[in-house]
Image (cartoon, rainbow, N blue to C red):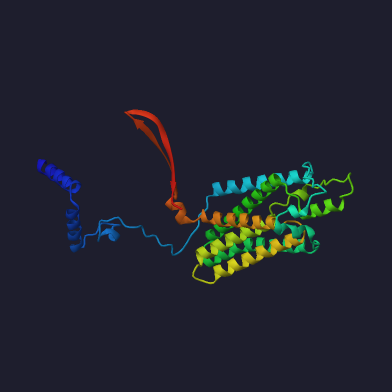
Amino acid sequence: MLKIASLCVTTLLGVVYATPATAQAAVEVADANNIVPPKAQERKTTLEPQVAQNPEEHVTFQSDPIADGAIVVVSLGVAGVLELINSTGEIRPQQIDPNFDHNRLISIDRAAVDQTPSKSAASLSTLGLGAAVGFALIDPVLTGFREQNVQAGLVDAIMYSETAALTLALTNVVKMAVRRPRPLAYVEAAAHKNDPTWSNSSTDSALSFFSGHAAMVGALGGTATYLAFARSKSTVRPWLTLALATSLTAFVSVERVRAGKHFPTDVIAGAFAGAGIGVVVPHLHRTADIQQRRVWVGFAPAVERDQAQGGMLTLSGLF
């Protein structure tokens, strides 16, 4: 028993105090005898740290029913309450000074006030929005068939729902906070310039910034484009999706301006805000990113002269 214990101690000390040359020689001996430890094949030729190789041949997405469900419900709840408040007319819209000089507007916005609004443009923009929503409903079904996995289609449906809910909530919050008059409100104010008793009472007339139509189409298009590039980056599908999404967003944005509902800056801001949400939502659901824990939060106590002196909170990550 004493000899066995002595042998174990000697072996342990040899491992602890082994020099790199000795360790390398041990690895070479193991290789000569075809002795490779499990899960260590990639490290058998060198002891130097190597960059982790994790090629994503097939990108997958995951969903947390509790977290995603809470995000969707809360977002829709906020958006719905704001819609109800707007419908009551209790919020008085911002009044435009009849003597306001239109030349003070941003240069690209001035044409929206001077133009003659198109009666059909509003309907065309809503039709474009319907096309984007329709694609968001069909795409998860197509994913289920392409991936031969019902769960993949369900996760896509959840991501599209989350994108739409967040976009709708953000749009309504920003509209209520900014309360920018629509171009038509400027036109009406100019028409009643000589009527001191006239005042604008429509709450909707002060909800110009930013465009909800442009934001929603941009958001759904952003999610569709991200999923297409993630799953079929070596085909023409993602580029076609990007082109169609961009074209549809541009079409809806132009029609909202032609209808007198928004200024050009309203639709530009809405499109960018929506596209940002549309890209971020699926990116946060990628399986590889979830497993790698790209963000870490840590706390370490600060000790000075053997006494605790508060602590340090750290936030680090890989982006």
Quadrant of the rendered image containing residue 278? bottom right
Q: Residue at x 18, y 51 (%)?
A: 19
- Residue 319 in the image, given as x and y percentages of width and height: 46, 53
Q: Residue at x 66, y 58 (%)?
A: 268
> Is residue 2 at all visible to an observer of this figure?
yes
- Residue 115 in the image, given as x and y percentages of width and height: 79, 61
Q: Nearer the viewer, residue 166 or 21?
A: 21
> Is residue 148 at all visible to an observer of this figure?
no
Give the vertical position of 71 relative to 53 (above or below): above
Give the vertical position of 204 relative to 234 (above or below): above
Q: Nearer the viewer, residue 317 or 223?
A: 317
Q: Residue at x 62, y 54 (%)?
A: 273
In the image as oriented, which residue stretches furthest toward the left?
3
- Residue 130 in the image, given as x and y percentages of width and height: 70, 61
- Residue 243 in the image, given as x and y percentages of width and height: 60, 68
User: On the rendered structure, is 121 left or right of 248?
Assistant: right
Q: Nearer the viewer, residue 137 or 168?
A: 168
Q: Nearer the viewer, residue 268 or 231?
A: 268
Quadrant of the rendered image containing residue 177? top right
User: On the rendered structure, is 286 left or right of 51?
Assistant: right
User: On the rendered structure, is 259 left or right of 177?
Assistant: right
Q: Residue at x 66, y 64 (%)?
A: 250
